[in-house]
Image: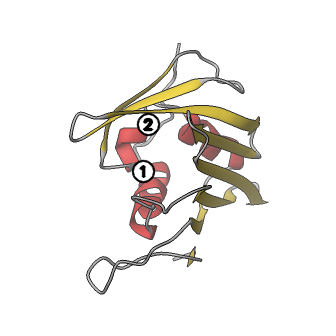
Amino acid sequence: MSLKIICSRNWEASKIHMKENKLIINIQKPVNYIFDYTINPINTPKWIKNIQIEETNEWPIKIGTIYRNKNNSGQWSEYSVSDLKQNRFFELKTKDGNYHVHYSYKPIDKNNTKLEYFEWVENGELLDPFTHDILERLKSAIEGPNEKISKRT
């Protein structure tokens, strides 16, 4: 397993207060495949269990595109694309600018990619930081034998 946890928390042991969270995983797919998969809102519920649906206000995405997602409690959240470079990085932030998440994609070779997930808040603490389990679900979804990139039209 090629997973490196820079910062995480164990809810059972104790609650760790954190302002930032960085996770790294290697995925056996080309960088363009992983980039396309992760920016496509149709795929999000396949690897983030707490998300029922995700949508964007436009496609293809660009800086300023709005992502909306609905969690399992029926609550909607909204993020805007704040930085983007095809097959290199993708960044979202909340409307108030407090929460940020940055995905960076680095090819290891033509069929392997290092994905770095980094989230942080300007003020306060991360309320529900990602764990390595979420990135493992992403890896399984992407590397799975039947997985294909869902196309947006």
List the single residue furthest toward the bottom. Answer: 13
Residues packed near mark 1 inside 10 Å, few (<14), some (14 to 19) or many (20 plus)? some
Please state which amino acid type lies under the numbered disc 2: Asn
Residue 128 shown left or right of residue 109 in the figure: left
Q: Residue at x 61, y 36 (%)?
A: 36
Residue 18 shown left or right of residue 46 in the figure: right
Colour scheme of the picture: secondary structure
Task: Identify the residue position indicated by label 1 in the image.
Answer: 141
Residue closer to the observer: 98 or 118: 98
Q: How far from the left and from the top, in percent, is residue 7?
A: 54, 76
Residues packed near mark 2 inside 10 Å, few (<14), some (14 to 19) or many (20 plus)? many
Q: How far from the left and from the top, in percent, is residue 52?
A: 29, 36
Q: Residue at x 75, y 57 (%)?
A: 106
Say above or below: 5 vs 98: below
Residue closer to the observer: 101 or 150: 101
Q: Which mark is residue 43?
A: 2
Q: How far from the left and from the top, in percent, is residue 73?
A: 21, 40
List the single residue furthest toward the front. Answer: 123
Residue 124 shown left or right of residue 48 in the figure: right
Residue closer to the observer: 17 or 88: 17
